[in-house]
Amino acid sequence: MTSHPQDARAWQRPDDPARPTSASLVDPEDDLPSANYGGDFETTAIPRYDAAKGAPAPPVFNLMHDPEPLPYVQPHTSHPVMPYGAEPTEIGHDVTDEQVKAARRRGTQDLGLMLLRVGLGVLLVGHGLQKAFGWWGGPGLGGFQDSLAEVGYQHANILTYVGAAAQIGAGLLLVLGLFAPVAAAIALAYLINALLAGVAGQSQSGFPFFLPGGFEFQVTLIVIAAALILTGPGRYGFDAGRGWARRPFVGSFIALLLGIGLGVAMWVLLNGANPLA
């Protein structure tokens, strides 16, 4: 029953003769939704403004069940010219199969890199086996430790095993072409120490210049190790699918600096002598 809240007579029963004529009964169940009510998504078709003229009414889409179809755009064979005079174009790759094959062709470059890599690795493995087991007239571990102590290295007993293992391990990795930049950096650090030790020993004998004394061999090995770090091992090895074998750049410079820094740091911290003094 609805009425004005200020009117006290509005709250009387319907059969009360004092009830005002403006009051009416309201069934609360009339506000409940019907069984087929679709909720807020249920829509009702709104007639068009020209429906009186006989135009067909637009279709009604029930959003609860049937999605509204997307507008169809008729494809065109040519695009209209935009206000700034440029037409849209499709971006594609113009690289042909011949260009890809040409990029993969490197001639004998990979073969030459494999030759340098395997040659340096075999030399390192051979000298490491001489120091570790005394093969081919090598000094063995005892003679290698004595030579390190004579040159002035501290902790020669530990450096004996480290030096022999570094030579053999780096050499094997270079032969296999596996982690070649790291292996070449380790070889570079070892070769720098070998060169400095030889120069220091010659300086004590009265020959301050190392090239006339036959140390061109160590210098050549150092150059080969540094070159392999910068060029990469080539495609003939286990590193063929890695970036440093295809296009070495930043990592090669880092490996080169690490190899040089490690070699110099080992000499300064474990020996400390001036090789030219």
Image (cartoon, helix red, strand yellow):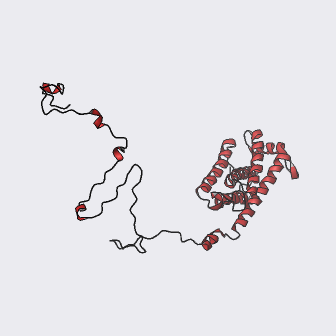
Residue at image point 40% right, 60% down = 70
Q: Position of residue 73 (x, y in %)?
A: 39, 66
Residue at image point 23% right, 64% down = 53
> Residue 147 vs residue 106: left or right?
right
> Residue 152 vs residue 22: left or right?
right
Q: Position of residue 236 (x, y in %)?
A: 72, 62
Q: In the image, is residue 80 above or below residue 194?
A: below
Which sits in the foreground, 121 or 144?
Answer: 121
Check the picture and name the quadrant holding the N terminus: top left
Which sits in the foreground, 138 or 30?
Answer: 30
Instruction: Count the marks.
Output: 0
Q: Residue 220: which quarter of the image?
A: bottom right
> Residue 121 vs residue 39: left or right?
right
The reply to whether residue 157 is in sight is yes
Residue at image point 38% right, 62% down = 71
Q: Position of residue 193 (x, y in %)?
A: 71, 49
Q: In the image, is residue 38 above or below residue 213?
A: above
Which sits in the foreground, 90 or 234?
Answer: 90
Which sits in the foreground, 209 or 244?
Answer: 244
Q: Residue 58: which quarter of the image?
A: bottom left
The reply to whether residue 204 is in sight is no
Q: Position of residue 62 (x, y in %)?
A: 37, 52
